[in-house]
Structures are given as C-alpha cells and as structure tokens.
Image (tube, rainbow, N blue to C red):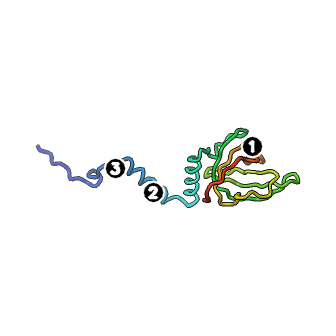
Amino acid sequence: MDEVPAEPTPETSREPQSGREQSGLRRFLRRLASSRAELEAEDLQKSSGEEGAIPIAVCPERKRACVAGTLRTVTLRPRGGAPALEAELYDGSDVINLIWLGRRRIAGIEPGRRLRAEGLVSLQDGRKVIFNPKYDLRGTS
C-alpha cells in the first residue's frame, strides 16, 4: 500500500529561524514586556561594562574598584563639622555613595550626570561607599 504524504501544517511547513532572528525576536519581546526602569537599568549595565567598570552589586568590600553609572542624588552633608559632598551613583545593578570630604560643591557633579569613579570600596551603615574617588565625567543620561 502506498502512503500518502501528509499535508504540510503551519508547524511543519515553516522553515526554522536562524539564531540571529530568534535572538532578535526574543530581545524585542523582552523589551516590550519590560518596564521603563528595567530597560534603563539594562542600558546602564551595558554602558558601564563598555567603560571598563564592574557592576556595583559585585564590588568587593575593602578592594579598589572602578564603577560607572548615573548620579541620582547629590547632597551636602556635614561630617564631623566639616563639609562633605555626597552623591548616589546607580549603575542598574546597585547603588554606591561617593563622598568627597571637605567639599561643598564640585563643578559637573549633579543629578542625571554620567560618571566613572574609582576608589576603595568600604561599607558604612550597610551601604557601599567610596571616599574621595577619582572620577571622570561623562555625558548626561
């Protein structure tokens, strides 16, 4: 008896997509379903990595580290009677406080500014901190 080939169904007649098309579709669907905050965090992590920085979330305590991200807040907070400029840097993975002792203001250090900073990471009151970091200003976010 001769077998009659089955008619192609949409599942069997479709050619397999290339890996590039699948990853592009996957990326598009993920971006479509993600919140704006998640997308910004992803973009920050990607750009931080391109600048040679490590994610703040994995910065080891009591080791020098290079971090990059966007300044969220900048405040003047006295420490021991002396001025201290404190900035919160966010890279999409976590937050680190950058503190410049003896400074009231630094030109270019303002909320929304992209920055790359390097220094000794310490823990103070459960938060990651770098005192008097070496820094490079980048474009605004």
Residue 1: quadrant of the picture: top left
Q: Residue furthest front?
A: 107
Mark 1 vs 2, N-terminal side: 2
Q: To which residue does mark 3 refer? A: 17
Q: Position of residue 63 (x, y in %)?
A: 70, 38
7, 97: nearer the viewer = 97
Q: How many marks?
A: 3
Residue displayed at 62% across by 59% down: 140
User: Badge 2, how many Cα within 10 Å: few under 14, some, many 20+?
Assistant: few
Q: Secondary structure at mark 1?
A: strand
Residue 104: quadrant of the picture: bottom right
Q: Position of residue 114 (x, y in %)?
A: 63, 55
Q: CA distance from mark 2 to mark 3?
A: 16 Å
As drawn, is 39 to the left or to the right of 78? left
Mark 2 vs 3, N-terminal side: 3
Find out whether the residues at labels 2 and 3 contact each other: C-beta distance under 8 Å. Answer: no
Q: To which residue does mark 2 refer? A: 29
110, 1: nearer the viewer = 110
Q: Amino acid at mark 1?
A: Ser
